[in-house]
Image (cartoon, coloured by chain):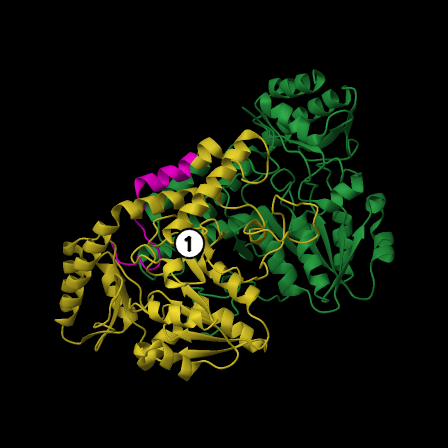
Chain colours: A green, B yellow
Amino acid sequence: MIYFDNAATTKYKPDEVIEAVNYYLRDVGVSPGRGSYSLGIEASRMLYKSRTAVGKYFGMSHPERVVFTKNSTEAINLLFKGLLKKGDHVIISCYEHNAVLRPLQDLKQKGIIDYSVISREDLGLEADTLLEKYANENTRMLALTLASNLTGRIIYKEDWMKFFHTKGIITFVDSSQGAGKLALNMTESQIDFLAFTGHKDLYGIPGVGGLCCESKAHFIPLIQGGTGIHGENYVNPDIFPEGYEAGTLNMPAIWALKTGIEFITAHSDTIRREEKALMTYLLQGLTDIDGVKVYDIENERVATCCFTIDDLSSDKTISLLDSKGICARGGIHCAILAHEAIGTVESGAVRISLNYKNKKAEIDQLLDTLRSR
Amino acid sequence: MIYFDNAATTKYKPDEVIEAVNYYLRDVGVSPGRGSYSLGIEASRMLYKSRTAVGKYFGMSHPERVVFTKNSTEAINLLFKGLLKKGDHVIISCYEHNAVLRPLQDLKQKGIIDYSVISREDLGLEADTLLEKYANENTRMLALTLASNLTGRIIYKEDWMKFFHTKGIITFVDSSQGAGKLALNMTESQIDFLAFTGHKDLYGIPGVGGLCCESKAHFIPLIQGGTGIHGENYVNPDIFPEGYEAGTLNMPAIWALKTGIEFITAHSDTIRREEKALMTYLLQGLTDIDGVKVYDIENERVATCCFTIDDLSSDKTISLLDSKGICARGGIHCAILAHEAIGTVESGAVRISLNYKNKKAEIDQLLDTLRSR
């Protein structure tokens, strides 16, 4: 089987990550912050180590300011619903995932906020021109995806972050695609908030994501409940980050995430080099096939690309590939704005997302299959 | 090490549960509902099997109506924040966990709802008397914990559920404590909604819980984002349960939960018999020690109890036990209403929560330690 759906989840997990899960389940097995007995305190220490591993990885000035959630979608909802107030305006790109679009649209439909979408043509604007064109007196946040989950194009711009931040506008990055492939430093790049997911390029397992909070702007919890501390309060205690993590945390996944981050830190050069070489090879191959149109091919990218074929729908392409044991995704990719931007709402698109463990021979099989359609 | 904190999490996990996690991570590893390739479809089938395993376990008429969340706290927040409307009134017991109290208090502070708390004295009331005393024309929901996480007392009453349900009041059970120890049948008992957690008595791992929806009453999603279906919508599609599960699901834990439920289904008689015998032995031993006061000792219970000691604070008791390798919890147990009800807000309480894997010899060590304090 050939797996080309790494933008959905990294199927390959390092042995040490799986071992970390097993270690937690078999040798620790208790919840952090719940018991003051020695093993409970050890669990709390492991939670702190995982938290700071994430915070350091993203270059936070206070690496413990990481709220763990179940995935990046929850982290984004937590921030948007907890921070944005009536009248606020948000600027997003036309490449945002539905995890960014939908909570904003929900808030808009409730009459709370409004948002503007940076068009594809305007993605090359200088920061000051962008501000002039898209901001108004109510603009409170600029939210950008690190990279498109559809075309792989890198959308995040450090210049924009820094400029908007100096203008007092909160800067947010959805790093679900690309964290682990691109190194981000929140302090240097003046990123106020960053959402991440564990199970993609950070090589963790599903069930954990989070919100890195470089900014101390106050936001309210999404979920109320037991926090293990200040149990006497009738509402969540105003303690960061515990007050935002009600309920039992997914410690096996949190501990494994620390191991995943250690893995990518140790292997990032190899991962980037291999993935870049594979992607260059794939793009060259795809463009050489008659009737194949690749999107955003000229742009800087992560190891994801998408294409359409003149004479074969994306659904039929996926079925054809599946018949050859090739896993890829077609249709609409949870990013309707991006499909609108590149003009593939009706057709859908075939997405190929690579991992450094893929082989050239696998790409050859893909290309051969497309050629002989 | 002796582990008596099973009400926080079941430290012992059956081998087959851990094997299920590993199987998913190593041999499946993809996300359900994201790809139409064969392995993606297999992942979706596994999700469906897990969903219906949960639904059948709780006696649902439509066992697929289970929304997976990260824990029971999220499930409770999802229901309360998604269902309750301005002016609604909720009746809860004085034994509710903070996971029930805090979202309600939050809604109350926002001026949306009000709630009443059934006093400890009134827990024996007949359903009609309860309704007369606590309900008003705005009462929309009766929410009861299955068992107290503090004293172990069973709070849930089938008679109440049935009576309130026939009066058009939504019935809800928080089964975080006791599911797996007590068999619940939502259809027969007319339970409209039930929240569960995977990592306690269902023998799953942390990172999964859910909301069983026997009722078709409409509620809005807590989290907006990618759902893998109807990606073209600007908000979550109105599809049940997928529209309530935005973001990547924790499939390793969901698949392991199915295995956990198979485990308790096969071993429930043994588990209940062993735990009952151990608890009887423990309660007898505790009551024989001078200065020890056990709470709710006369009540039907799960395998949890709590006590205070005249001449030793709960914190000091926990430290003493920890020095002997005994893990138990003291202080306030994320259920402030219950502490108020039994009068242990100032003192805190020592909680012992058993598992059928515990041994009489372990209880003897606990009792010896308390005797020789």
Nearer to the camera, B326 or A197: A197
Residue B296 quadrant:
bottom left
Question: Quick check: A249 left or right of A37?
Answer: right
Picture coordinates of residue B236 (x, y %)?
Answer: 64, 53
Identity of the residue drawn at 71% across and 32% down: A306
Residue type, numbered disc 1: Met
Q: Is residue B189 visible?
A: yes
Nearer to the camera, A42 or B182: B182
Identity of the residue drawn at 30% across and 48% down: B264
Total residue callouts:
1
Question: Quick check: A85 left or right of A254?
Answer: right
Q: Which residues are magenta?
A: B1-23
Picture coordinates of residue B20 (x, y %)?
Answer: 39, 38
Nearer to the camera, B215 or B4: B215
Nearer to the camera, A66 or B176: B176
Whether residue B16 appears in magenta in the rendering, the answer is yes
The residue pinned by badge 1 equals B60
Picture coordinates of residue B273 (x, y %)?
Answer: 19, 55
Tell me: residue A65, above or below residue A320: below
Question: Chain letter of disc 1?
Answer: B
Question: What secondary structure is marked by label 1?
Answer: loop
Tell me: residue B356, above or below residue A241: above
- Would you call the spot at circle 1 few (<14 residues within 10 Å), some (14-19), or many (20 or more)? many
Q: Is residue A247 visible?
A: no
Q: Residue furthest bottom?
A: B133
- Identify the image quadrant of the C terminus of chain B: bottom left
Identity of the residue drawn at 38% across and 55% down: A31
Q: Residue furthest front?
A: B166
Whether residue B353 appears in magenta in the rendering, the answer is no
